[in-house]
Amino acid sequence: MLPSPREQALSLLEALGVPPARLGAQGLAVHSPIDGVLITHVTETSPAEASALIKQAHAAFVQWRKIPAPRRGEFVRLLGEELRLHKQTLGQLVTLEAGKILSEGLGEVQEMIDICDYAVGLSRQLFGLTIATERPDHRMMETWHPLGVCGVISAFNFPVAVWSWNAAIALVCGNAVVWKPSEKTPLTALATHAIAERAAKRFGGLPEGLLSLLIGGRELGALLVEDAHVPLVSATGSTAMGRQVGPKLAARFARAILELGGNNAAIIAPSADLDLALRGIAFAAIGTAGQRCTTLRRLIVHESIYEAFVSKLRRVYQTVAIGDPRQPDVLVGPLIDAPARAQMDKALNEARAMGAQVTGGTHVDVPHLKGCYVAPALVEMPRHDGPVLHETFAPILYVMRYQNFEDAITMQNSVGAGLSSSLFTLDMREAERFVSVEGSDCGIANINIGPSGAEIGGAFGGEKETGGGREAGSDSWKAYMRRATNTVNYGTTLPLAQGVSFDITTD
Ligand code: NAD
């Protein structure tokens, strides 16, 4: 018999070193989606405290930027070590607070460790170019400097990994980080900060306030977005949130990394390895109970293999284990809360009204647990329209048929979001076309794997209504720094660029 989520969460918070003063009978109420029961309240940050923390972060940045980058990397290395030591406890807490199955909770912490390792290496590679100059005895180069306070706003579904993608890179780049986690998942944020404090102690201390946490609702996110001490905000959440945050940042010429909603598709071509596709599709569509930004939401299947493939998929939907995400055999945990389940019901009703055939999608009673459990829904649509065109943050997979590959690509691209996409095929021409300029219009385009489950080494993010931001690997670090072009004259004359002459009389 497993302990109650409340009991287990409180003992994990203690083991992780979260100060008891942050928890109590008043403040933000935190419920576990596993049983819907209140775990605790968390003290909220007042707007005045938030402004003071942002100012303090700016002062910390002014000190931190002078520390050599490889030394900053040493702090991130220690953070990675502490995360390794606390992987089990933090992973369990992610499961209790966000409801994802334990293997995914642990995977989320592993992703934090991975980005720390990546950032440590990066701390010795923040280099610019030297550029050929047209002027004799001159040198032209670019240098990269830290930016300032980086604001991070994160969503409930990756309650800690998103912070680490931003923070590990921002820190080695010489910045301070102020984090506004989701109001639904403040406990894992507090735990992450407690882990970072241990790393800071081993490092010999960080400038006071270099890492800060704002606990509360969207109004604290808005405050971060409007504060002139914050030159960059990385905001992860719904497209509706991005529509509010983006223009505010633009109005004060601050930088935005927007990581917003997805409406991701996979195409199954006639040549596809159907067994491999089945596993890829099942994980991408059902995993995390459909609550990943990269969750597969639209399946576009060639008509010649439709019945062979979709009948197997129907069986998976009918047999997948739903329940307490701490149980090892369970693959589908609860939805985050009742409004999420209501959104799912609404989308399914719209689909049914269009004539869709729905497998699953029902509410599921799990003995002794009052969470919002649902059977994942496989929705065979008469056409690509209605609820198919929008992200519903729940395990709904809409299935459509195609005849012609070009039409399948057009269908895949014909939604507002542009996050992730995939194609299952063994036809090399189709595969190359899909990743070419005429193929998928998404930030992520995969072949023979599903659209979800990215690694940190690549730049993560999407186009169109997904916001255009990129974070984690590749050259995403450049968004956290400012570039200066420097031209140095080591000669005795002053030739002007483009042959311009400007002779003044000197005595
Ligand atoms: P949400 O938009 O409700 O909230 C996300 C965060 O934004 C929260 O911290 C919230 O307090 C804050 N916020 C909301 N409105 C704000 C405003 N006006 N100003 C400042 N802050 C504001 O999203 P959610 O329900 O927590 O998460 C699910 C959504 O996040 C889905 O749409 C999913 O696709 C998206 N998501 C995207 C990515 C990505 O990398 N593209 C990753 C995870 C989740």
Image (cartoon, rainbow, N blue to C red):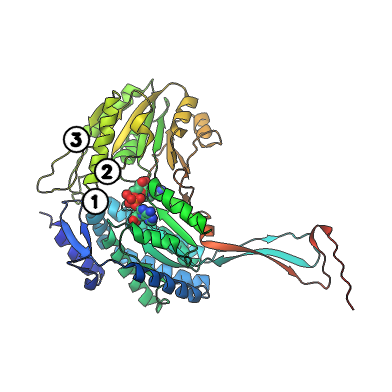
Q: In this view, does 485 lie above or below 407?
A: below
Q: In this view, does 260 lie above or below 12?
A: above
Q: How crowded is mark 3: few (under 14 residues within 10 Å), some or many (20 or more)?
A: some
Q: Label 3, secondary structure: give it.
A: loop
Query: Badge 3 is on which residue?
Result: 362
**Residue 97 pos. (x, y %):** 24, 56
**Depth check, front residue: 338 or 225:** 225
Q: Do the residues labelled 2 and 1 touch (CB within 8 Å)?
A: yes
Query: Badge 1 is on which residue?
Result: 99
**Residue 260 pos. (x, y %):** 41, 48
Q: Are marks 2 and 3 in contact (CB under 8 Å)?
A: no
Marks 2 and 3 sit apart, C-alpha to C-alpha, by: 13 Å
User: Sequence order check: which comes first, mark 2 or mark 3?
Assistant: 2
**Depth check, front residue: 443 or 348:** 348
Marks 2 and 1 sit apart, C-alpha to C-alpha, by: 9 Å
Query: Badge 2 is on which residue?
Result: 289
Amino acid residing under circle 3: Thr
Residue drawn at point x = 45 percent, y = 43 percent: 465
Q: In which quadrant of the rendered view does residue 45 lie?
A: bottom left
Q: Label 2, secondary structure: give it.
A: helix
Q: Is 152 placed left or right of 21 in the picture?
A: right
Q: How crowded is mark 2: few (under 14 residues within 10 Å), some or many (20 or more)?
A: many
Amino acid residing under circle 2: Ala
User: Sequence order check: which comes first, mark 2 or mark 1?
Assistant: 1
Q: Do the residues labelled 3 and 1 touch (CB within 8 Å)?
A: no
Q: Is 86 placed left or right of 425 in the picture?
A: left
**Residue 464 pos. (x, y %):** 48, 42
Residue drawn at point x = 42 percent, y = 51 percent: 244
Q: Is residue 388 above or below residue 205?
A: above
Q: Is residue 37 something one can see in this rendering?
A: yes
**Residue 505 pos. (x, y %):** 89, 73
Marks 3 and 1 sit apart, C-alpha to C-alpha, by: 18 Å
